Image: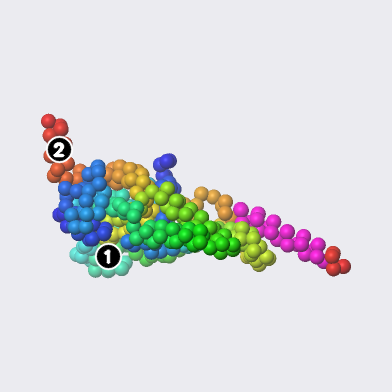
Amino acid sequence: MSSPSKNRYAKLPGRGRRRRTGVTASPAFTKGYLGEDHLLVVESDGFLEKYKRFYFKDIQAIVVQKIPYWRPTIYVTHIGLVLLLILAALTDSAIQIVMVVLSIVVGLMVSIDALRGKLCFTEIRTSVQKDQLAFMGRWRVALKCLQILKPLIEAAQPQPVPNPDHASQTSVENR
Amino acid sequence: MSALVLCPKCSGSLPETLWNQSDLQACPGCESSLKIEVFPALLRQANQGKPGERVVAESEAGCFFHPQKKAVLSCENCGRFVCALCDMEMEGTHLCPACLESGARKGRIKSLQNEQMRYDKLAFALVFYPVALLVFFWFTIFTAPAAIFIVIRFWNAPMGLMQKGRGYLWAALIIGIIEIMAWIVILIYFLRQIN
């Protein structure tokens, strides 16, 4: 990934919609871009783009909550798929074709979702706000983005984090 | 201090022992798996805003917006004297509140821009989707001229912070012209058939 220059942005991996308790809560797609001194979150609902900037020096914490694969919506989708397959087996002629097509569509959706990896909920915190980073909605993507963002945020905030356990561990190692 | 970082699921406080660990940590409240990255800004004291100093001597320049406050510098855009309270530093430039507001409204200060209409995407959608959704191809008799109008009208308009070129506008223009030419050919063909 190329480093962003003034007023130029480098795209971060991932895109997604805002979620609440694992269910999509907004139709707008969110993408993340890396600016020179800030993270730009772009929320686009078709033709209107809304921008939110999180300056590296102001970011206090990023918390990622891993969501287990077997969540209520996945249960419902799998039960629906099984029902469609049963109906396809029991019916005949035109209805059977419709059921088979629907099963393929639902099956594809389930497979794509599984292939994209586990979901997660990412929250960013500054001194004045708390917001969801919807583009970091998949666990793998969130880890990749954190790998990119962490050094940049730490470079913008030079003081070390006082973590008692971590601090004592490193001081023992140094000895 | 530990109450500062909260679990996104249960809003319970996350103790410092869970911060910045390489592996996943369980929330003490809801047991959900968390990765918590905390940065020094969390422990930083919030900076106090600068108060404007009062004008002591009559010879001292006062702020344009608060005449009783001492001017510390002048706006780099309009030249008005401003006090420490009214000095707005943006992208290394010192501005007065009025210039900052007008700059944000007119979209001159990029870092204050918080939304943008993407006319390029709109023009492209007008020429592309009716053709892509085959059944609606005849919509292009209206949408193609509309798209070309948008392309011409907004050719020089800003198209978002991440815009690198006019790809969508060029594509909309070319496809729109092709669609209009196709309609002209169809029209000529039918007129000849009638004659």
Examine the residues drawn in magenta and state their main secondary structure: helix
Classify residue A53 as left or right of residue B84: right
Q: How many other residues sit within 10 Å of disc 2, few (<14), some (14-19) or many (≥20)?
A: few
Nearest the viewer among A87 and A147 is A87
Q: Amino acid at mark 2?
A: Gln
Q: Nearer the viewer, mark 1 or mark 2?
A: 2
Classify residue A129 as left or right of residue A74: left
The x, y position of residue A21, in whole percent, is: 32, 61
* Residue located beneath label 2 in the image: A169
Same chain, labels 1 and 2: no
Q: Quadrant of the C terminus of chain A?
A: top left
| Color scheme of the displayed model | rainbow
Q: Which chain hosts label 1?
A: B
> Was residue A163 drawn as part of the magenta stretch in this picture?
no
Q: Which chain hosts label 2?
A: A
Q: Residue at x 36, y 50 (%)?
A: A118
Q: Amino acid at mark 1?
A: Gly
Nearest the viewer among B188 and A8 is B188
